Image (cartoon, rainbow, N blue to C red):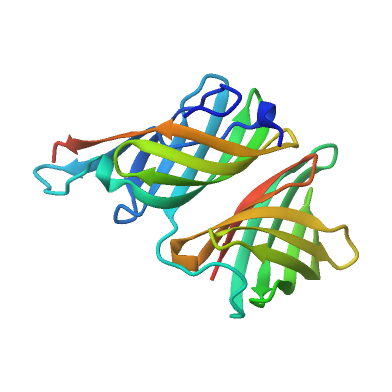
Amino acid sequence: MNLQTLSLAVLVFATLFGTGNASASCSNATVLGVYGSLGAGFEGGAPSADVIQYTADGAGHLTGTGTNSTNGVIGTGTFTGTYSVRRIVLEA
Amino acid sequence: MTFPNGSTASDNFVIDNAKKGAQGIRTDSSVVKTGFVLAQGTVTCGLTGIKHNFAANLSGTVKGTGRIAYVGQVILDGNGNVSGALTRSLNGTIATVPVTGTYTENANCTGTAQITPSGHSTVNFNFVVVNVGLEMLLIETDAGTVVSGTMQQ
């Protein structure tokens, strides 16, 4: 495990966009269960990608594991985190 | 989010896919990275003995070599064996080759795959099963590579 090179993307702030008076609700409870994610881009100018599995408890807490490659250096490991979900209503 | 070594990372996400997924972007300085999230859903993972056919799409870079991309059909036989064929573009040089290999899939829906394109070195992946088993998210774990993608049924 190379935690020094591990940098995994994790949901920390989520938004559900709605329009007008749409009735869709959205809260931390919206994000509940096991998820997988794939990210790709650049870190410090170097190519980077990650694949993560994480569990959200519906109350703003995350745990998970994942694999990251940045500039070809592979890291795997675990993390903990928090998230917050809010709804933004867009004017129609 | 905090890692065991004390480092942190942050993202903004927008929930989509009937609240079963999200699109995300890293918000840490010096990072330019986007991605997506899919719920795992209800699925039985492991070597279940059930064969599944996937369409694979992976791309990235190989340090010292260049840009690489794969698209092809990958068959997981449910018993840990991989077969299929991939078309690879390496810096624009195209080759379509059969592939063989092995894989492990854990009950928690994570796993590893070792795929060998005919005439080439074995490529190693870690993966996560999502979308009620219809999709896998993969990342190559060979040093020097930054290659990731999906396989969809």
Q: Farthest residue toward the right? A: B119
Residue B57 position (above or below residue A7):
below
The image shows residue A36 at horizontal and vertical percentages of 49, 51
| Horizontal side of residue A85 vs A67, given as left or right | left
Residue at image position (60%, 75%) is B53
Q: Nearer the viewer, residue A60 or B133?
A: A60
Residue at image position (47%, 29%) is B1
Instruction: Let me know if residue B3 appears in the view.
Output: yes
Instruction: Let me know if residue A46 appears in the view.
Output: no
Residue B32 position (above or below residue B24):
above
Q: Quadrant of the C terminus of chain A?
A: top left
Q: Nearer the viewer, residue A61 or B112?
A: A61
Q: Quadrant of the N terminus of chain A?
A: top right
Residue at image position (75%, 37%) is A72
Residue B96, quarter of the rendered image: bottom right
Residue B46 position (above or below residue A22):
below
The image shows residue B28 at horizontal and vertical percentages of 50, 23
The image shows residue B106 at horizontal and vertical percentages of 60, 61
Residue B93, quarter of the rendered image: bottom right
Q: Nearer the viewer, residue B87 or B42?
A: B42
Q: Farthest residue toward the bottom? A: B50
